[in-house]
Image (cartoon, rainbow, N blue to C red):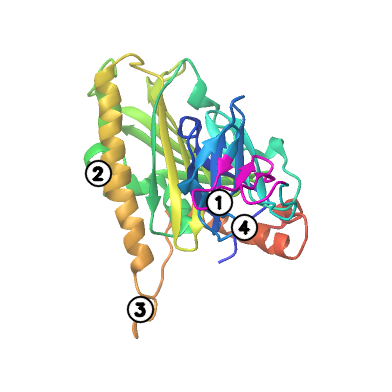
Amino acid sequence: MAFLRNSWYCAAWSEEVGRSLLQRTILNESVLLFRQTDGAIKAICNLCPHKLAPLNLGELVGDSVQCGYHGLQFDGSGRCTHNPYRRETDADAKLKTYAVHEQDSIVWIWMGAGTPDLAKIPCHDHLSSPSRRTIRGNERMEASYRLMLDNLMDLSHAQFLHKVMSATDAFDGPRNQVRQQGDSVWSTFRYPFGKAQYLFRRHLPDPDADVTQELTSRWDPASSIFNEISVFVGDEPPFTTIGTRGSHIITPSTETSCWYFFAASRNYALDDAAVDDEFRTWQASAIRGQDIPMVEAIQRAPSDFAVLPSRIAISADAGGTLTSRLLDRMIEAEQESLDPQDVLASV
């Protein structure tokens, strides 16, 4: 499987990177992340060029990483700053480095050889908004990141996979709109005149009132998804609106594994610890207990059976299909040394 390399990927939440060594495998490369004494984050190859010992098994000495095997030290520029076996440092002992940028409490990493473009970092500014309360986490998955992107671009699956907490009695005939805007894909499901989902119901003026619910997902290259779940109360504007804005960022680790970074930022009950617990329960149940096992099961499904069912498509697939098609074109363009932006108009 080919990856889009000239793109920003989530390497970690900001609070995960400190004065200790954090290793992540991203696009089949072992990356080491750490914070310098001035607070800047650095990302370097995790393998010592001496014996290929993983540097995350060593320690930080000032702003250099000391290999735990033979004591060679490397700074955030990848340069060997100390070799205990010779007086001078070895100019050939140079590690690969990666551009990183901290934004919206996310550590973004650029994995390609092209010039990093900060303007292409996906927006997740709800994560740091003082008018919202955010609950988040992450999980490593044994499945391709492409399968998880497909899952997240079709929020209608919540009616069945997450039925206890997310089902609505207005599901019949949901209105689905999919559109491409620049290099982003938007998918929106609208459910008019039904009871609100479990997470929101008790926070409405009338928990039993019929409401309109809107579920929107926005994909940005290569594997970032922003979603918004809105509950509109009232027959005409101005509506009372409560809901969440979510970050669901999938970072490929290998062809068949990935990191899933998830967050939900609500605009109500900001200081209610019990509601915090409700969202943690939802993340444990829906994401860790349902989404991830389902997608991992699809990954394990054998493709070499003598008889396989004929594949079918449903209307809810539209967002994921457009996302997949666009990503394929961008990867193909990159491999042919074309500008991935040139393919957008042709998708």
Label 1: state its secondary structure: loop
Label 4, label 2: how far apart the Cα atoms are: 51 Å
Please name the residue that numbered disc 3 is placed on. Answer: 308
Nearer the observer, 221 or 62: 62
Which picture quadrant has residue 164?
Answer: top left
Q: Quadrant of the N terminus?
A: bottom right
Label 4, label 3: how far apart the Cα atoms are: 47 Å
Amino acid beneath label 1: Asn
Please name the residue that numbered disc 2 is placed on. Answer: 163
Please name the residue that numbered disc 1 is placed on. Answer: 46
- Using the image, determine if residue 199 lies above or below residue 292: above
Residue 134 in view, yes or no: yes
Q: Position of residue 338 (x, y in %)?
A: 78, 59
Numbered label attached to residue 49: 4
Question: Reading the chain from its start, which is encountered first: label 4 or label 3?
Answer: 4
Residue range (magenta) = 65-87
Q: Are marks 4 and 3 in contact (CB under 8 Å)?
A: no
- Residue at x 22% of width, y 24% of height: 208
Q: Quadrant of the C terminus?
A: bottom right
- Residue at x 28% of width, y 15% of height: 205
Residue 195 in view, yes or no: no
